[in-house]
Amino acid sequence: MDTQIVLLRGINVGAANRIKMPALCEALVDAGIGTEPRTYVQSGNIALQTSLGERELAAAVAAMLTERFKIVTPVVVREADELRDVVVGNPFPDEAALNPKALQVTFLAEAPTADRVSELEARAVGGERVAVLGRHLFSWHPEGLARSKMALKLTPKSAAATARNWTTVLALLELAS
């Protein structure tokens, strides 16, 4: 069994998609999806042991969420080694050290196109920057996400993608260890 990281989009944000993490962990085990689930905060960050591959795991978790909790949301999966590569490959290490909550990593199902990256760069203001590492889009928001026009376009509603700040990314790597 391998350690996989499951990232759920839009969980416990506002009134929608409310789910308690202990209930989610129990459901993952009950459905035979994985063992030893561990969560970080209340926003759908799970590390677990499973023999399922990335696509199989994402599909199984999505189906379980729909069946058991009536929640339909994108599910993104990363192997622990890939998450480690994200941390090591961070193109903005100085910024991450300065303000880890202003650095965001968007976990995508597929690598973004050059046109998509150019579109995001065109929206960057106030020192914002964006960089790509495989299926991961790093975005630096020195003035905060709330003021960012670029941040609004990072994860289109229809995309199989979700974003986490650098603090959460580091915590997920620790959770997976």
Image (cartoon, rainbow, N blue to C red):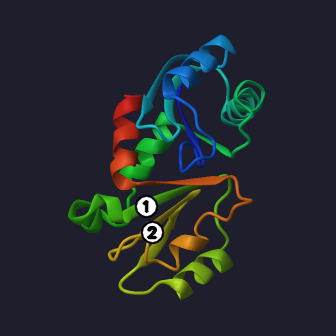
Rendered view: 11 above or below 177: below
- The residue positioned 68% from the left and 46% from the top of the image is 74
Whether residue 161 is visible, yes or no, is: yes
Helix, strand, or loop for circle 2?
strand
With 149 as the anchor, is 70 left or right in this view? Answer: right
Mark closest to the chain's N terminus, 1 or 2: 1
State the separation of the CA atoms marked 1 and 2. 5 Å
In this rendering, the count of numbered labels is: 2
Rendered view: 95 above or below 71: below
Where in the figure is residue 128, as x and y percent of width and height?
40, 79
Residue 55, by quadrant, is top right
Whether residue 2 is visible, yes or no, is: no
Q: Amino acid at mark 1?
A: Gln
- The residue positioned 53% from the left and 38% from the top of the image is 44
Q: Nearer the viewer, residue 114 or 29?
A: 29
The disc label shown at residue 139, or none:
2
Where in the figure is residue 22, as x and y percent of width and height?
50, 21
Q: Are marks 1 and 2 in contact (CB under 8 Å)?
A: yes
Q: Nearer the viewer, residue 131 or 143?
A: 143
- The residue positioned 41% from the left and 35% from the top of the image is 40
The disc label shown at residue 104, or none:
1
With 9 as the anchor, is 74 left or right in this view? Answer: right
Rendered view: 89 above or below 173: below
Residue 142, by quadrant, is bottom left
